[in-house]
Image: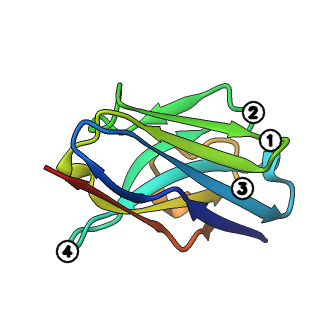
Protein backbone atom coordinates (compact mmCIF):
# COMPACT_ATOMS: atom_id res chain seq x y z
CA UNK A 1 0.00 0.00 0.00
CA UNK A 2 1.22 3.51 -0.83
CA UNK A 3 -0.42 6.83 -0.02
CA UNK A 4 -0.09 9.72 -2.45
CA UNK A 5 -0.66 13.43 -1.83
CA UNK A 6 -0.50 15.97 -4.63
CA UNK A 7 0.23 19.68 -4.24
CA UNK A 8 1.17 22.68 -6.34
CA UNK A 9 -1.99 23.25 -8.34
CA UNK A 10 -3.53 26.67 -8.79
CA UNK A 11 -4.65 29.38 -11.19
CA UNK A 12 -2.22 30.56 -13.86
CA UNK A 13 -2.46 32.57 -17.06
CA UNK A 14 -1.93 30.97 -20.43
CA UNK A 15 1.76 30.70 -21.18
CA UNK A 16 2.65 30.40 -17.51
CA UNK A 17 4.16 27.56 -15.53
CA UNK A 18 3.31 25.40 -12.55
CA UNK A 19 5.15 22.61 -10.77
CA UNK A 20 3.12 19.82 -9.26
CA UNK A 21 4.49 17.57 -6.54
CA UNK A 22 3.29 14.20 -5.32
CA UNK A 23 4.58 12.94 -1.98
CA UNK A 24 4.40 9.21 -1.34
CA UNK A 25 4.38 7.30 1.91
CA UNK A 26 4.06 3.66 2.75
CA UNK A 27 5.90 0.98 0.83
CA UNK A 28 9.17 1.55 -1.00
CA UNK A 29 8.64 4.42 -3.40
CA UNK A 30 11.38 3.31 -5.77
CA UNK A 31 9.49 0.08 -6.40
CA UNK A 32 6.72 1.90 -8.30
CA UNK A 33 6.36 3.34 -11.75
CA UNK A 34 4.80 6.77 -11.24
CA UNK A 35 2.38 8.56 -13.51
CA UNK A 36 0.40 11.75 -13.84
CA UNK A 37 -3.13 11.79 -15.19
CA UNK A 38 -5.72 14.54 -15.52
CA UNK A 39 -9.47 14.84 -15.73
CA UNK A 40 -11.38 17.83 -17.07
CA UNK A 41 -15.08 18.35 -16.31
CA UNK A 42 -17.25 16.03 -18.36
CA UNK A 43 -14.29 14.12 -19.72
CA UNK A 44 -12.62 10.82 -18.92
CA UNK A 45 -9.39 10.70 -16.98
CA UNK A 46 -6.47 10.81 -19.40
CA UNK A 47 -2.80 9.98 -19.29
CA UNK A 48 -0.26 12.81 -19.07
CA UNK A 49 3.17 11.38 -18.28
CA UNK A 50 4.95 8.49 -16.63
CA UNK A 51 8.41 7.77 -15.26
CA UNK A 52 10.20 4.51 -14.60
CA UNK A 53 11.22 3.33 -11.16
CA UNK A 54 14.78 4.59 -11.53
CA UNK A 55 13.76 7.75 -13.35
CA UNK A 56 15.74 6.77 -16.40
CA UNK A 57 12.75 6.44 -18.74
CA UNK A 58 9.83 8.77 -19.33
CA UNK A 59 6.84 8.79 -21.64
CA UNK A 60 4.41 11.61 -22.45
CA UNK A 61 1.06 12.16 -24.04
CA UNK A 62 1.41 13.91 -27.39
CA UNK A 63 -0.64 16.83 -26.08
CA UNK A 64 2.00 17.74 -23.46
CA UNK A 65 5.21 16.58 -25.11
CA UNK A 66 7.79 19.37 -25.15
CA UNK A 67 5.91 21.40 -22.53
CA UNK A 68 5.71 19.12 -19.48
CA UNK A 69 8.53 17.30 -17.72
CA UNK A 70 8.10 14.47 -15.23
CA UNK A 71 10.84 13.71 -12.72
CA UNK A 72 11.27 11.91 -9.43
CA UNK A 73 13.47 12.02 -6.37
CA UNK A 74 13.50 8.58 -4.77
CA UNK A 75 15.38 9.89 -1.73
CA UNK A 76 12.47 12.27 -1.06
CA UNK A 77 9.72 9.86 -2.12
CA UNK A 78 8.39 12.52 -4.48
CA UNK A 79 7.44 12.76 -8.14
CA UNK A 80 7.12 16.09 -9.93
CA UNK A 81 5.41 17.45 -13.00
CA UNK A 82 6.88 20.67 -14.36
CA UNK A 83 4.32 22.29 -16.64
CA UNK A 84 5.42 25.09 -18.95
CA UNK A 85 3.65 27.02 -21.72
CA UNK A 86 0.32 26.16 -20.17
CA UNK A 87 -2.82 26.38 -22.28
CA UNK A 88 -6.47 26.74 -21.26
CA UNK A 89 -7.05 23.18 -22.45
CA UNK A 90 -4.65 21.98 -19.75
CA UNK A 91 -7.27 22.94 -17.15
CA UNK A 92 -8.15 19.83 -15.16
CA UNK A 93 -7.74 18.02 -11.88
CA UNK A 94 -4.31 16.40 -11.95
CA UNK A 95 -3.73 13.07 -10.23
CA UNK A 96 -0.56 11.18 -9.50
CA UNK A 97 -0.65 7.42 -9.49
CA UNK A 98 1.62 4.49 -8.66
CA UNK A 99 1.97 1.24 -10.57
CA UNK A 100 3.69 -1.78 -8.98
CA UNK A 101 5.02 -2.99 -12.32
CA UNK A 102 8.23 -2.73 -14.28
CA UNK A 103 6.69 -0.33 -16.80
CA UNK A 104 3.17 0.99 -17.27
CA UNK A 105 3.19 3.78 -19.87
CA UNK A 106 -0.34 5.08 -20.45
CA UNK A 107 -2.23 2.01 -19.26
CA UNK A 108 -4.48 3.49 -16.58
CA UNK A 109 -5.43 0.02 -15.34
CA UNK A 110 -1.83 -0.68 -14.33
CA UNK A 111 -1.92 2.04 -11.69
CA UNK A 112 -3.21 0.71 -8.37
CA UNK A 113 -2.79 3.74 -6.13
CA UNK A 114 -4.07 7.26 -6.66
CA UNK A 115 -3.86 10.62 -4.95
CA UNK A 116 -6.81 12.89 -4.28
CA UNK A 117 -5.93 15.29 -7.10
CA UNK A 118 -4.98 18.94 -7.37
CA UNK A 119 -6.81 21.52 -9.48
CA UNK A 120 -4.98 23.32 -12.27
CA UNK A 121 -6.80 26.18 -13.96
CA UNK A 122 -5.32 28.03 -16.92
CA UNK A 123 -6.99 31.30 -17.87
CA UNK A 124 -6.89 32.71 -21.38
Q: Secondary structure at mark 1?
A: loop
Question: Which residue is nearer to you in this view: 73 or 60?
Answer: 73
Judging by the rendered image, the residue that carries numbered circle 2 is: 54
Alpha carbon separation for disc pair 4 and 1: 34 Å
Q: Position of residue 103 (x, y in %)?
A: 62, 41
Q: Secondary structure at mark 2?
A: loop
Q: Residue at x 75, y 33 (%)?
A: 54
Lower position in the chain sequence, tag 3 or tag 1: 1
Residue carrying label 3 = 100
Query: Which numbered circle lies on residue 42?
Result: 4
27 up-or-down from 33: above or below:
below
Measure the alpha-carbon separation of dots 3 and 4: 29 Å
Q: Is residue 75 left or right of residue 34?
A: right
N-terminal-most mark, 1 or 2 = 2
Where is mark 1, residue-wise?
74
**Going from the N terminus, do you reach mark 4 or mark 1 first?**
4
The quarter of the displayed image where residue 72 is located:
top right
Q: Position of residue 67 (x, y in %)?
A: 35, 30
Disc 2 vs disc 3: Cβ atoms closer than 8 Å? no
Q: Is residue 52 visible?
A: no
Residue at the image point whose x is 58% and y is 68% from the top: 114
The N terminus sits in image quarter = bottom right
Q: Nearer the viewer, mark 3 or mark 4?
A: 4
Label 3 secondary element: loop
Spatial separation of the CA atoms under disc 3 and disc 1: 15 Å
Few, some or many C-alpha atoms within 10 Å of disc 3 (few <14, some 14-19, many ≥20)? some
> How much space separates mark 2 and mark 3, taking CA atoms?
13 Å
Amino acid sequence: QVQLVESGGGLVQAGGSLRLSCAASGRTFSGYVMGWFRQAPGREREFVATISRSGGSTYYADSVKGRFTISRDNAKNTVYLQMNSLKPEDTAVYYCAAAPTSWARSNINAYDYWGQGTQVTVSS
